[in-house]
Amino acid sequence: ATTWPPTSYRLSIRPMNVQMLPGAATPMVGFAGRFPGPTLRAERGIPTVVTQANDWTENVTIHNHGHKVSAESDGHPVDYIQPGRYKNYYYPNDQRAGTFWYHDHTMDLTGAHVYAGLAGFYIIHDKAEDVLNLPSGSYDVPLLLQDRTFGDNNELIYNGNPHGWGGPTPVINGTANPVLNVAARKYRLRLLNGCNARTLNLHFAVQGKPVPFQLIASDGGLLEAPVPMKAITVTPGERYDVVMDFTNFPVNTVMDLLNVDDPEIDPLLPAMMQFKVNRTEVDSATVPPKLSVIDRLQEKDAKAFGTVELGLSADGETWTLNGTTYDPARIDIRSKRDTVTIWTLKNATAFTHPFHKHLVQFTILDINGQPPPPELAGWKDTVGVPGNGTMRIIFKNEQFSGTYVLHCHRLEHEDHRMMIQESVE
Ligand code: C2O
Ligand code: CU
Ligand code: CU
């Protein structure tokens, strides 16, 4: 079901100053001069054309994370839009509704460019999901969760060392330490870990007391059923949609969104943002016990198998995939289109790496031999592969062929070439 002409957007990538902290504005680079970039919205099955005009001084290439698109529109790392040029990206939106995001993907510079501001939400809606009556409209709030280091003049400090970069200041939807006013009712919060390198372990609390929530969606859209949870781990690039119910909290209640860092991270980032209940309101939204049907690929139908090993070079200096580092001129894996495929992801390092595959969503068959927990049981495009762990994923490359990358979504790992290429044939 396609219509013509498609919905179209035109975004100018250009330098801008953003008021993120009191005092001086922060020099950044953004889509349409905004940070985050404008939230692009599409209806399932109705294609979109996004024209990206590079009005900046550096090469860029723009990737729509989680999208099933042709290789030409995928934002390959060396498919540059040079300064002064533009490119039309075609998005069929022929996939499940969900929370996606577009960001720069320039070879060796993705971390620097995303940190500087080149990221925004892309949301696919599906009318068929309206019957669920989930919180919508202004009660459906995408939250881009990031961390930054600011200098004395509020300028961004970036050090793209191979380990990873972030900072002690939470920046949510482009605002440092924000407070969001909410009504005493249910909200759908679309949590995107847009940090370059930090894994977030998130929970909500009122005066230090944890408040449970319902998890309703992961990277590739709605789960089968809501999962009641107290905390959620989100590695860089992953998305989780949750429903937080503020109904029983009196006006003036302040709820914190908190992060419990991994001990290896320095500096720590304990608090992300606050929600302040500022009014009561009638709430007719629901979270039904059944959300969607997941058409799972079956292990017995798999016809192709592969291994991706996440590693570290012998000298301990370079992260690797299958023992190698990124070369845009080399194909590392050849895959057949329309073939049920299982990959075994083997993490030979002690660290969690957020593994990301382009083109299609996958589901997880097992993690260290065990079935995935409910939050990891839906469609995914990015997943934290635990240190020294093994995970099997199943997917079917569909509709398009060509060269697509797979990589670690810790952006400094990716920029130090923890990335390889798959040729879908
Ligand atoms: Cu979100 Cu290949 O990236
Ligand atoms: Cu991607
Ligand atoms: Cu990594």
Image (cartoon, rainbow, N blue to C red):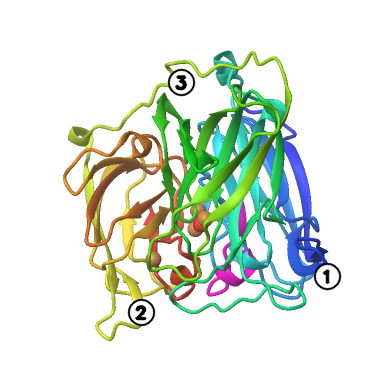
Disc 2/disc 3 C-alpha distance (Å): 42 Å
Foreground residue, 21 or 255?
255
Which of disc 1 and disc 3 is earlier in sequence?
1
Residue 228: quadrant of the picture:
top left
Q: Nearer the viewer, mark 2 or mark 1?
A: 1
Left/right placement of residue 288 relative to residue 122 reads left
Under circle 1, the secondary element is loop
Residue 417: quadrant of the picture:
bottom left
Q: Nearer the viewer, mark 3 or mark 1?
A: 1
Name the disc covering residue 361, or none. none
Q: Amino acid at mark 3?
A: Leu
**Span shown in magenta:** 102-114
Distance from mark 3 CB to nearest ligand 2 atom below 8 Å: no
| Mark 3 vs 1: CB contact within 8 A | no
Q: Is residue 99 above or below residue 15?
A: above
Foreground residue, 175 or 307?
175
The crowd level at tag 2 (other Cα within 10 Å; few <14, some 14-19, many 20+) is some
Residue 393 percent across, percent down from the top left: 29, 45
Residue occupied by mark 1 = 24
Foreground residue, 212 or 73?
212
Disc 3/disc 1 C-alpha distance (Å): 46 Å
Q: Is residue 171 above or below residue 378?
A: below
Left/right placement of residue 169 relative to residue 358 reads right
Which of disc 3 and disc 2 is earlier in sequence?
3
Residue occupied by mark 2 = 318
Left/right placement of residue 372 relative to residue 422 reads left
Q: Amino acid at mark 2?
A: Thr
Residue drawn at x 55%, y 68% is 166
Q: Amino acid at mark 1?
A: Ala
Residue 262 percent across, percent down from the top left: 39, 61
